[in-house]
Image: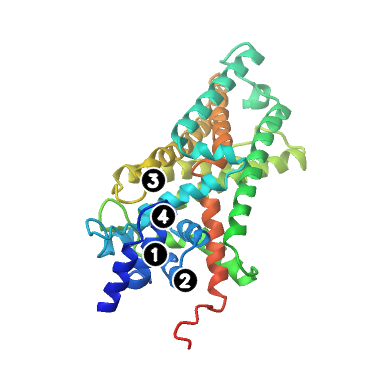
């Protein structure tokens, strides 16, 4: 015990400096203590290291799901002099990771004022689509035959605008996460590792907390609601993406143009996805306001809330567009919905959406690393 306390005290004196250094300091304390070793993927990955370089810190920070269990279990958490706060330290490094690996690099600064960025991009896009509707059709209130929104904006116009912005967003995110992977990766990716990482992503495994009872949110009580609302959000988004993909196949492969019947596959998928994106983000927004301030970085709250609110506005406007598609209000709701979707695409590579991409890479790294032979050689002569 005396040796343990000595190691922890020595690690506690490594503080100061950058967010990377703070995570390295905390990880050395945790590595000496190891009380939280079974809590999530971060701590087993930590035990496979003695020192923590920049790549290790970036990897562990993105592997952290900010469930909060370690903070409430830690005997060295504030107000202790060692001030071990894993969620806060990891959150600060995650944002630095997004900024450092952003492409183009100068756009990484948008993460620092992301709430304002999302609000401006969405507002300007919404206004632009309302003005375009007025300029093209001479009126905002139009009742197209059969709810055909291509009578407001042609298919080619929408495909060109959204296709160009979406491809840029995918390119920017792809380059960023590829650079991140190049920094943290080692070893080849086996089928088993890829399968495990995919399972962990799709089930949101590490939002189950240290013992599978859920996350800590406003206090030390465990709850699975954060995981459930993440599931609604994630699968709601995927269903909406599937609806768009199926509609694209209908249009180009089958020659079937929108609008589609209420019982058609694109409409069913989109409706279910829209409901998921109402339930999930509503719950996450509520939990975010109730969350203990010690969990994560409060300076990133605007980014978190702006992203959640934008998802809510996209889903709500999309469902209202469906409800009013056979009325004169359809053109208005179409412009509003397109404005919010464009705002999402414009800010996708430089906002909260990126955390899912980088976390997926970290989970893949974890699955690969677990299958590699340890090189620590602890106890060797």
Tell me, for residue 90, which label it has, or none. Answer: 4
- Residue 74: x, y in percent? 28, 64
Q: Between marks 4 and 3, how big is the CA–CA gap?
A: 20 Å
Q: Between marks 3 and 1, how big is the CA–CA gap?
A: 29 Å
Determine which residue is flagged by label 2: 49
Determine which residue is flagged by label 3: 284
Mark 2 / mark 1, whichever is N-terminal: 1
Q: Which residue sits at x=40%, y=42%? A: 300
Q: From where the camera sits, is residue 224 visible? A: no
Dot 4 crowding, Cα within 10 Å, few <14, some 14–19, many 20+: many
Q: Between marks 2 and 3, how big is the CA–CA gap?
A: 34 Å
Question: Which of the 4 image quadrants contains residue 47?
Answer: bottom left
Dot 3 crowding, Cα within 10 Å, few <14, some 14–19, many 20+: many
The N terminus lies in quadrant:
bottom left
Q: Secondary structure at mark 4?
A: helix
Mark 4 / mark 3, whichever is N-terminal: 4
- Residue 147: x, y in percent? 62, 26
Q: Between marks 2 and 1, how big is the CA–CA gap?
A: 10 Å
Dot 2 crowding, Cα within 10 Å, few <14, some 14–19, many 20+: some
Tell me, for residue 27, which label it has, or none. Answer: 1
Q: Is residue 253 above or below residue 66?
A: above
């Amino acid at each position: 015990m005396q040796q343990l306390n000595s190691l922890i005290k020595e690690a506690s004196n490594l503080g100061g400096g950058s967010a990377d250094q703070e995570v390295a300091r905390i990880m050395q304390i945790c590595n000496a203590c190891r009380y939280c070793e079974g809590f999530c993927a971060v701590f087993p990955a930590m035990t496979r290291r003695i020192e923590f370089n920049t790549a290790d810190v970036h990897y562990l920070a993105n592997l952290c799901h900010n469930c909060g269990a370690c903070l409430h279990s830690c005997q060295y958490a504030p107000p202790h002099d060692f001030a071990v706060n894993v969620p806060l330290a990891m959150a600060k490094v995650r944002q630095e990771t997004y900024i450092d690996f952003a492409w183009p690099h100068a756009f990484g600064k948008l993460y620092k004022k992301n709430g304002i960025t999302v609000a401006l991009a969405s507002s300007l896009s919404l206004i632009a689509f309302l003005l375009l509707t007025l300029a093209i059709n001479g009126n905002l209130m139009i009742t197209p035959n059969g709810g055909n929104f291509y009578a407001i904006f042609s298919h080619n116009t929408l495909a060109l605008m959204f296709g160009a912005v979406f491809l840029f967003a995918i390119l920017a995110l792809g380059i960023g996460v590829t650079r991140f992977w190049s920094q943290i990766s080692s070893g080849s990716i086996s089928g088993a590792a890829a399968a495990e990482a995919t399972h962990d992503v799709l089930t949101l495994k590490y939002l189950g907390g240290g013992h599978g009872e859920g996350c800590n949110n406003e206090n030390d009580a465990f709850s699975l609601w954060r995981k459930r609302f993440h599931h609604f959000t994630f699968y709601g988004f995927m269903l909406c993406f599937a609806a768009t993909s199926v509609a694209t196949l209908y249009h180009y492969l089958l020659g079937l143009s929108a609008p589609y019947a209420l019982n058609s596959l694109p409409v069913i998928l989109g409706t279910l996805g829209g409901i998921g994106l109402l339930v999930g983000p509503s719950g996450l927004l509520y939990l975010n306001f109730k969350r203990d301030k010690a969990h994560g970085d409060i300076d990133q709250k605007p980014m978190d809330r702006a992203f959640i609110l934008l998802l809510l506005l996209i889903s709500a406007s999309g469902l209202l567009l469906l409800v009013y598609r056979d009325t004169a209000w359809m053109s208005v709701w179409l412009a509003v919905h397109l404005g919010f979707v464009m705002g999402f695409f414009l800010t996708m590579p430089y906002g909260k959406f990126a955390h899912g991409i980088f976390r997926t890479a970290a989970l893949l790294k974890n699955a690969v690393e677990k299958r590699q032979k340890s090189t620590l050689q602890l106890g060797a002569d």
